[in-house]
Image (cartoon, rainbow, N blue to C red):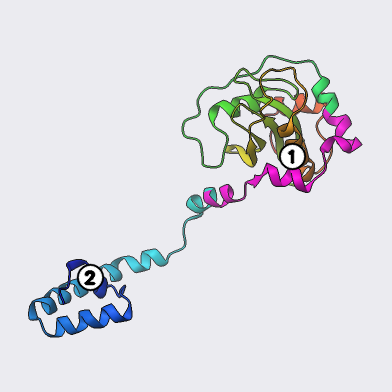
Amino acid sequence: MTISPEQLAAYADGELDEITAARVRRAVEGDPHLASDLAQLTELHNMLAARFDPILAEPVPERLSSPIEDAAKVVSLDAARQARQSLWQRPQFRFGAGAAIAASLVVAVLVGGRGGVPQGYADTQLAAALDGTLSGQTAPDGTRLLISFRNGEGAACRGYTAQTASGIACHDDRGWKLKVLGGADAQQTTQYRQAGSADSAVMAAAQDMAAGPAFDADAELAARKDGWNTRP
């Protein structure tokens, strides 16, 4: 049989099935040129293995693995919507969020570009809305803020719906980390509208994450002034 360079290389790397490997082995035994080529490939394979196998065996640095792990932890709003009842059905959240939504609106504080955005974090436009827009207010880019609260780690978290997506982001020293992601609300066309399905899903997810009641107007203003820092 004719042995292609690809088959010979695969044989040297141990990647052929047993039947094909046996055929290549017989061909090599009867052809000095193939035997010479195989010897060179085997030598190259061994040299590369000795050089790079120890590197491949090392654990992946946390600075590289952490963004991937964080992204994998982002949950679906559809699952939250199906697994939890609406947040508004619980009085301790209904009153807290209602006060925030009924609060006087202020002009959104926009922030400039921050350079590269870490994987799993809000982009500059969404981060600007999360930084400066109060609950019940719609940012200039169309992002509507629904609720603010703290999770079990004391991080400030905010629920939102936007033109392209909805979700919950929690603030840390790197920015707004996306914790829950879902689709956009088809009803999100104007600032003044009834709550849509995306709103309900965000509220249900917030209920599951929150360690206490939603921020009222004063608590939200104080958290914004403090830069949404984590609290014990």
Q: Is residue 34 above or below residue 174?
A: below
Q: Secondary structure at mark 1?
A: loop
Is residue 210 rendered magenta in the image?
Answer: no
The rendered magenta stretch, by its main secondary structure, is classed as helix
Q: Amino acid at mark 1?
A: Arg
Res 172 seen here: no
Q: Residue at x 75, y 20 (%)?
A: 193
Q: Which mark is residue 231?
A: 1
Q: Is 135 on the left or on the right of 24, as rendered? A: right
In the rendered image, residue 150, in percent from the top left (x then y), is placed at 76, 39
Q: Which mark is residue 177?
A: none
Find out whether the residues at labels 2 and 1 contact each other: C-beta distance under 8 Å: no
Q: Quadrant of the C terminus?
A: top right
The crowd level at tag 2 (other Cα within 10 Å; few <14, some 14-19, many 20+) is some
Q: Is residue 111 above or below residue 18?
A: above
Toward the viewer: 146 or 54? 146
In the rendered image, residue 78, in percent from the top left (x then y), is placed at 69, 43
In the rendered image, residue 208, in percent from the top left (x then y), is placed at 78, 45
Q: Quadrant of the N terminus?
A: bottom left
Quadrant assignment, res 102: top right
Read off the magenta span: 68-97
The residue indicated by pointer 2 is 7
Quadrant assignment, res 19: bottom left
Q: Is 197 on the left or on the right of 179, as rendered? A: right
Is residue 85 rendered magenta in the image?
Answer: yes
Distance of label 2 from label 1 (alpha carbons): 61 Å
Q: Amino acid at mark 2?
A: Gln
Return the disc, 2 or 1, that comes first in the chain's sequence: 2
